[in-house]
Image (cartoon, helix red, strand yellow):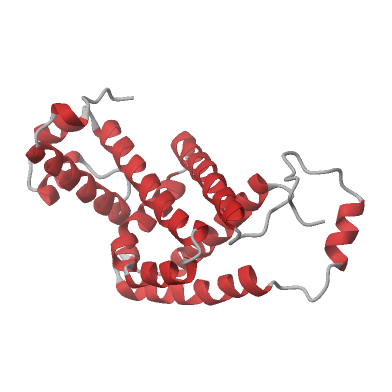
Amino acid sequence: MVNMRSPGSRDTSDLTTRARVRDAAIARFARDGFETGLRTIAKDAGVSAAAIVKLFGSKDGLREACDDHVFRVIRESKAEVLAEQSAPGAFIGQLARIEAYRPMIAYTLRSIQAGGTHARDFIEHMVADAVEYVEAGVEAGTIVPSRDEDARVRFLIGATLGALLLDLSMTTDPDALATSEFWERALGRLTLPALEIYTEGFLMDRTLLETYLLYIPDPPGSSAGARA
């Protein structure tokens, strides 16, 4: 963990430089992976490698700052969509701004592809954040409750990111994550079926669910308000 001074201890130009370097790092890590060196990121951001070390302490410190920013943006954007009564309008607004989100989604995919402890920690952080904003959506009345919210969130994250990783594995373009064509194709395949399943369901009756529930105990963390 890199010790950072409080925001009040930096001037505005320092904060602007930090944001520029962080955003350049997110875009470069998303495009080329985490083996990218500080010199490349420094060139993208218009600073020196020494300046990055001064701002973030190390490459690990820079990556931690990137993680924190991506988590915050995802958490805030999802909370806006899921917890507000104006959710449909917010969702359409986010689709219109997808170009701005693209580097962060690509960064997330690269983090998972990298594997190891960092990838596991990254996913666990995503799950913990998602449980919070989904529960907020349940309280707001925009989401139905689950018998096991943690398990449902893990399934939804796996389904969404898994679909994008599947599309990525099928492309022969090493720079696919940086192209509009990849994202238009991948999101085009994902968005409609996902919204149909989330909104309208998939099975015509409850037979399979009710049969399954007869043979399992209550899931750990089962929500008291979940559907019977």
Residue 14: quarter of image: top left
Q: Residue at x 38, y 67 (%)?
A: 94
Q: Is residue 154 above or below residue 53?
A: below
**Residue 134 x/y as whole percent:** 56, 52
Can the viewer see residue 48 in this picture? Answer: no
Query: Is residue 105 visible to us here?
Result: yes
Quadrant of the frame with the N terminus: top left
53 sits left or right of 207 in the view: left
Which residue is located at x 75 percent, y 39 percent? 220
In this view, 30 is above or below 93: above
Q: Could you tell me residue 81's position as x and y percent?
A: 46, 61
- Residue 9 lies left or right of residue 197; in this view the side is left
Locate residue 196 relative to residue 1 in the image: left or right: right
Viewer-closest of 180 and 5 = 5
Looking at the image, how many numbered discs can be counted on the residues? 0
Viewer-side residue, 145 vs 119? 145
For the residue pair 207 and 31, the one nearer the viewer reads as 207
Q: Residue at x 63, y 54 (%)?
A: 155
